[in-house]
Amino acid sequence: MSLFFKKSIIAATGLFLCIFLIVHLSANMLLLLPENLARGLYNSYSTTLRESILISIIAYLLYISIIFHVIYAGIVTYKNRQSKGVRNVMNHKNENSSWASQNMGVLGVLILIFIVVHLVNFWARVKLGIGENVKTDVAGNMDVYEVTFTLFHNIYYVIFYSILMIPLGFHLHHGLKSAFKTLGFYHKKGLKILAKTSLIYAVVMSVGFGIIPIIVYFK
Amino acid sequence: MKVTFKIWRQEGLETQGALKTYDVDRLSEDMSFLEALDHLNETLVLKNEKVIAFESDCREGICGACGVFINGRAHGPHDNMSTCQLHMRSFKDGDTIVVEPWRAGTFPIVKDLVVDRSAFDRIIEQGAYITAKTGTAAEANAILIPKEVADASMDVAACIGCGACVATCKNASAALFVSAKINHLNKLPQGQPEAHKRLLEMTTQMELENFGSCTFTAACEVECPAEISINSIAEMNARYVKAKLFG
Ligand code: HEM
Ligand code: SF4
Ligand code: FES
């Protein structure tokens, strides 16, 4: 399989994950509503998702995307390191390229750690029933709101969740624009717009996800 | 003007190299960087020491022979400039200047600052030319090419094959060089008949030579003396998809 193909898999799965993040953040904004509204809405939204077949399919695509993204990112990064071989005695990379672009692998590993903890916190409890039992709310829905509420009243989790959204922001800033170029988008003006869009997207995702635990903590 | 050079000395591919320090005096700010190295070499000759091996030919930024890594940057501290166009006035009196060869697995060190860039030649051999006879200048003028197309082609044809893109890339990717060579011909009517074949054969050779893959850090477009843009790589990728689907 050609390197181009491998890199395209990273790009395509990455873009799919980027779209997912928009949906995920929008839904999580519900958590910021006053508690009496948020609990009912969030729990019924969560139940709807769990019961929809379409969402189940998308969820599997999501798991596959994460796995492929990580595996191919690992393969390509390893291969690229091998191609470089020797290191420079002195290298002022910061003068010709962004820090994020030089450290996508490290940033990715931080995000992976986040994803694992995040899945253990929510997915494992709600979907797999592993860990402490999840209660139901007055409407009979699983009280996922309560799960987030309790989790984000633990200051350590608040710090963990919020801090790790910083590497996510850096990863997305480089990743989004790079993915388009990898897949062959080369329109000159379009690329300028893309660069700005990537920055805005990364800031919105990073700040958006990062601020939710903090706001919930003070609720 | 006086500077301290720390220069990579290495006998050959199999031997260990190391930085060696040279205090060089009586330099002029108007000297080019390569002239300063010449000056240093002359003092080494007088001392009966081995001169520092480095490459150069045109010394006017068009042949691509001269590239070395200077103070952590390909072709020195300026953007988009070849080593031979760098002058000593870019440094301060008393500066320490670290000089090392291009570092990439695909560019083995021959001696001191000289590396073997023949991997580039083998990629060129895979189709960076057209097999059809294009005739004389008069016939060439009979093929109408819109100015924007000719300009875009010339922009990438400017690549001098210096290898800075590979040397500065954390992945030792040759994507900028290869994209320049491919797009140069594939944009023009003369390049059309062999466009897909050229693209697939050149990119295949690029992989066989063990160059890494492009992750768009964009370091290359900052160091490239010919100012080739990384958009050229994105364009090559688009052409690659097209060649795979319709080639
Ligand atoms: C929410 C999760 C993630 C999203 C949305 C995401 C998004 C992206 C995107 C869009 C790209 C660009 C592909 C390209 O350059 O063509 C990318 C590249 C990459 N990602 Fe991710 N990613 C995520 C998680 C991860 C994880 C968990 C890892 C590793 C453990 C990772 C490692 C990498 C690496 C190594 C690259 C390529 C690096 C490079 O271009 O130098 N990513 N990612
Ligand atoms: S693309 Fe630029 S940096 Fe790379 S070989 Fe050509 S001229 Fe040198
Ligand atoms: S010596 Fe020819 S480009 Fe520098």
Image: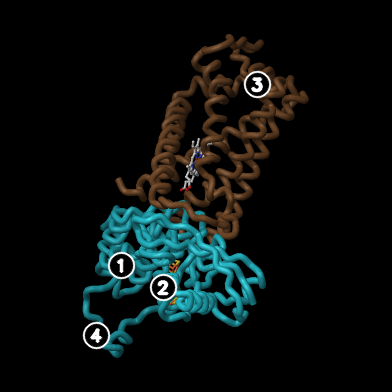
Chain colours: A brown, B cyan
Asked if marks 1 and 4 fall on the same chain, the answer is: yes
Front residue of A4 and A99: A99
Q: Is residue A211 above or below residue B37?
A: above
Q: Is residue B4 left or right of residue B203?
A: right
On-image quarter of the N terminus of chain B = bottom right
Task: Please state which amino acid type lies under the numbered disc 1.
Answer: Asp
Q: Chain of mark 2?
A: B
Q: Measure the alpha-carbon separation of dots 2 and 3.
A: 64 Å
Task: Please state which amino acid type lies under the numbered disc 2.
Answer: Glu
Q: What kind of element bears circle 4?
A: loop
Residue B106 appears anywhere in the view: yes
User: Pointer 3: what residue?
Assistant: A148
User: Mark 1 or mark 3, which is nearer to you?
Assistant: 1
Q: Chain of mark 4?
A: B
Q: Chain of mark 3?
A: A
Residue B55, disc? 2
Residue sitting farthest toward the bottom: B138
Front residue of A176 and B39: B39
User: Mark 2 or mark 3, which is nearer to you?
Assistant: 2
Q: Are marks 4 and 3 in contact (CB under 8 Å)?
A: no
Mark 2 residue's CB less than 8 Å from ligand 3: yes
Q: Is residue B80 left or right of residue B154?
A: right
User: Mark 4 or mark 2, which is nearer to you?
Assistant: 2
Q: Residues within 10 Å of mark 1 (few under 14, many from 20)?
A: few
User: Pointer 4: what residue?
Assistant: B135
Asked if marks 4 and 2 fall on the same chain, the answer is: yes
Task: Please state which amino acid type lies under the numbered disc 4.
Answer: Gly
Task: Please state which amino acid type lies under the numbered disc 3.
Answer: Thr
Residue B121, disc? 1
On-image quarter of the C terminus of chain B = bottom left
Q: Residues within 10 Å of mark 4 (few under 14, many from 20)?
A: few
Q: In the image, what residue occupies the spot 29% across and 90% down?
A: B138
